[in-house]
Image (spheres, rainbow, N blue to C red):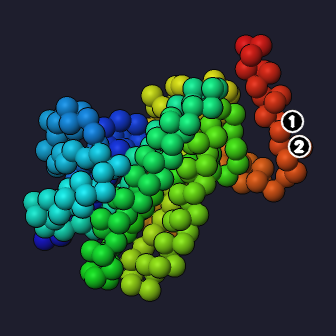
């Protein structure tokens, strides 16, 4: 009899995290689903009994530890931790709202670090497992009205790269996920063009395949867009700014 695989997913109440919870559960995995909105986690459980709700505010470091402990006590094991927590507020940039900027950094970066902290020792001692972090192509270069979001994702990608070396020697896999634009309540707030935008289900399919069937450090999609964004990292700022300004003007005209 094949041993059941268990995955812990944060940010599971909506967007990519929700789509991932459904994708893994539909493929036979046991899913520990975490997010702040308990009612949405309960609806996931009703949709598929393989999804177990574990309410969590990732900004609370002690709660992260306690929730992971409860997951181990209830499910007995975790094979993969997939951290999808993220938030964005374009209005934070308009009036340079420092409180909102700090909240975005706290949630996207330190909230994910809190989650990693709760599994670090477990996987290290187990000498197996997989820590996967959802970052974004927004971490490649700055985007309009997204300074805090871009900065948080750039920091997260760099941290995950360092974590790769820290955990590799213990047999623990580390990966980073860099999606392009995915249609979620978060991206609905954007006021700039979002080329090649995809559904959360599209993202979940690519991430599932990357975690289960491939061994790459970075998963990025859709390829035609993310490769372009990688190229843009190396062009001079003057040219990059002109490209974005042109796109913004086109958006205003439409």
Between the C-alphas of marks 2 and 1, the distance is 5 Å
Disc 2 residue crowd, few under 14, some 14–19, many 20+, Cα 10 Å: few
Q: Is 237 or 174 nearer to us in this picture?
A: 237
Q: Are marks 2 and 1 in contact (CB under 8 Å)?
A: yes
Residue 98 lies in quadrant? top right
Task: Residue 251 in the image: state x and y as whole percent.
Answer: 73, 20
Q: Is residue 142 left or right of residue 123?
A: right
Q: Hey, which residue is sitting farthest front in the picture?
A: 98
What SS does tag 2 mark? helix
> Is residue 26 visible in the rendered structure shown here?
no
Callout count: 2
- At a point 89% along the width and 43% down the height, the residue shown is 239
Q: Is residue 252 above or below residue 204?
A: above
Task: Residue 21 in the image: state x and y as whole percent.
Answer: 30, 46
What SS does tag 1 mark? helix
Disc 1 residue crowd, few under 14, some 14–19, many 20+, Cα 10 Å: few
Residue 31, which numbered label? none
Q: Is residue 31 left or right of residue 129?
A: left
Task: Residue 15 in the image: state x and y as whole percent.
Answer: 40, 37
Q: Is residue 238 above or below residue 71?
A: above
Residue 71 lies in quadrant? bottom left
Q: Hey, which residue is sitting farthest bottom in the picture?
A: 169
- At a point 72% along the width and 54% down the height, the residue shown is 230
Q: Is residue 184 above or below residue 65?
A: above
Quarter holding the C terminus is top right
The residue to which callout 2 is attached is 239
Q: Is residue 68 left or right of residue 196?
A: left
- At a point 20% along the width and 56% down the height, the residue shown is 67
- At a point 28% along the width and 82% down the height, the residue shown is 125
> Is residue 78 visible in the rendered structure shown here?
yes
Quarter holding the N terminus is bottom left
The residue to which callout 1 is attached is 242
């Amino acid at each position: 009899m094949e041993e059941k695989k268990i995955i812990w997913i944060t940010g599971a109440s909506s967007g990519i995290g929700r789509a991932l919870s459904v994708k893994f559960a539909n493929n036979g995995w046991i899913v520990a689903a975490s997010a702040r909105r308990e009612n949405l986690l309960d609806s996931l459980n009703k949709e598929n009994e393989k999804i177990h709700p574990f309410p969590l505010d990732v900004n609370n470091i002690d709660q992260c530890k306690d929730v992971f402990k409860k997951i181990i006590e209830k499910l007995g094991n975790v094979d993969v931790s997939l951290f999808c927590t993220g938030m964005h507020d374009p209005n934070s940039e308009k009036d340079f709202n420092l409180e909102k900027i700090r909240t975005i950094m706290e949630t996207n970066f330190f909230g994910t670090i809190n989650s990693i902290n709760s599994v670090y020792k477990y996987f290290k001692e187990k000498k197996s497992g997989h820590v996967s972090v959802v970052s974004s192509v927004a971490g490649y270069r700055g985007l309009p009205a997204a300074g805090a979001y871009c900065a948080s994702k750039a920091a997260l990608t760099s941290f995950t790269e360092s974590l790769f070396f820290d955990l590799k020697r213990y047999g623990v896999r580390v990966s980073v996920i860099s999606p392009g634009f995915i249609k979620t309540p978060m991206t609905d707030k954007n006021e700039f063009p979002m080329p090649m935008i995809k559904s959360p289900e599209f993202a979940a399919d690519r991430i599932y395949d990357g975690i289960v069937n491939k061994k790459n450090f970075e998963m990025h999609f859709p390829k035609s867009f993310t490769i372009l964004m990688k190229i843009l990292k190396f062009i001079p700022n003057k040219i990059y700014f002109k490209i974005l300004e042109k796109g913004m003007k086109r958006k205003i005209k439409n």
